Image (cartoon, rainbow, N blue to C red):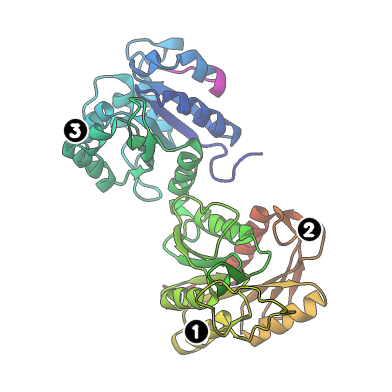
Amino acid sequence: MSDPLLGGKRIILGVTGGIAAYKAADLCSKLVQAGALVDVVMTEAATRFVAPLTFAALSGRAARADMWAAPGGDTIAHVRLAAEADLVIVAPLSANTLAKLALGLADNLLTSTLLATPIACAPGAEGAPWVLAPAMESHMWANPLTQSHMEALRGRGAVQVGPGTGRLASGALGAGRMAEPAEILAAARRALARGGPLAGKRVLVTAGGTQEPVDPVRYITNASSGKMGVALAEAAADLGAQVCLVHAPLAAPVPWGIESVPVLTALEMSEAVLARAGQTHLLIGAAAVADYRPEVAAAQKIKKTPGQEGLVLHLVRNPDILGQVAEVRKETGWPRMVIGFAAETQDLLANAGAKLRAKRLDMIVANDVTEPGSGFGSDDNRVTLLFADGRQAPLPAMSKLDVARRVLAAALEETRWPE
């Protein structure tokens, strides 16, 4: 299936010399599977690690490395590729090519092509966004010259992803590993989303099930995996938003480029949300927040005692986070829009509608968590959207990412959110 951001896009994939070039083959394959048209441009050093034929087979297009070759009579390939590019990715980016790009040198096909492709920092600007994935030995990466070159390109609008820390080709451990293809793919999507309908807007999403401690080794929680919240954060970022994910423990990774604010308890989540609510255009409360917590958490592990038949815990109410947000919004007008979630086991629409009204939400997403293949822990969901004006929009079963996209599409139809 074609990716909504990458599908149909013309991408220059620059590959430079380094053992991480083998990962570029996987990246090329993933880009093609997403529906992108990939033109691979290699340095001569890169061909010593992976043959151009490999990339040609993966992309279905000729992989180029020779500045002086003109396959099919294409004598000015660097100019044509630059003019057609929607996005530039260089992975791996060696210290040598990084220096050349920062200084504007153009002594091979890749550097010539990129010099002809200005870094587009805004939608409609000349050129194309650049995504750079440096990979080199840790001392080379830490060298002040390398750092100044990377800083110069970031200053011109290039997106840097990685490098990571781990085992390097030398056998040493340190910073310099190329980011994984999935991370680079996510960075590419973020770069292409800069001009989306939520560009310049701040979105806050809560996710996961809070954990309320009983003692140092036990806690009260629920079955929420956080997958729906993660999907919502990704869908909002795909529309160009600046996204903050305030989350309890998750069963899914936080997508690249999204601010992660990890919390454990409902009190911690409340504090994190309220600290940001006044600067948030859209708040989506998808977390499964515990309604109650133990009044006192034992300082040491609670032990069984001889003859003890039970244990009594005194629970107290946790703050109603969306209720708190409603009060902030009443006073300040922020957040501009608030969407809640209702995970129910009975009387789905009645209970969700009551929550919508009580918390003065603009929209609520209702789902029956007892439905097979839907709800907590599942990769799919079946929901009904309820709006403040009484409208209802039931959706068929679909992936949580597709649900998230439908929720965001509905939000965009509701308001334009002034600055």
Q: Is residue 138 above or below residue 69?
A: below
For residue 38, say whether it is visible: yes
Q: Are discs 2 and 3 less than 8 Å apart at CB? A: no
What x and y, as percent, mark residue 374?
76, 59
**Span highlighted in magenta in the image:** 57-63
Circle 2 residues within 10 Å: few <14, some 14–19, many ≥20: few
Circle 1 residues within 10 Å: few <14, some 14–19, many ≥20: some
Q: Report the Cα–Cα distance between label 2 and label 1.
A: 32 Å
Quarter of the picture holding the C terminus: bottom left
**Along the viewing direction, whichever of 327 and 418 lies nearer the viewer:** 327
Identify which amino acid the numbered label 2 is placed on.
Answer: Pro
Q: Which mark is residue 103?
A: 3
Identify which amino acid the numbered label 1 is placed on.
Answer: Arg
Task: Write the residue at 56% across / 67% down.
Answer: 217
Q: Report the Cα–Cα distance between label 2 and label 3.
A: 54 Å
Task: Write the residue at 54% across / 23% down.
Answer: 59
Q: Which mark is residue 396?
A: 2
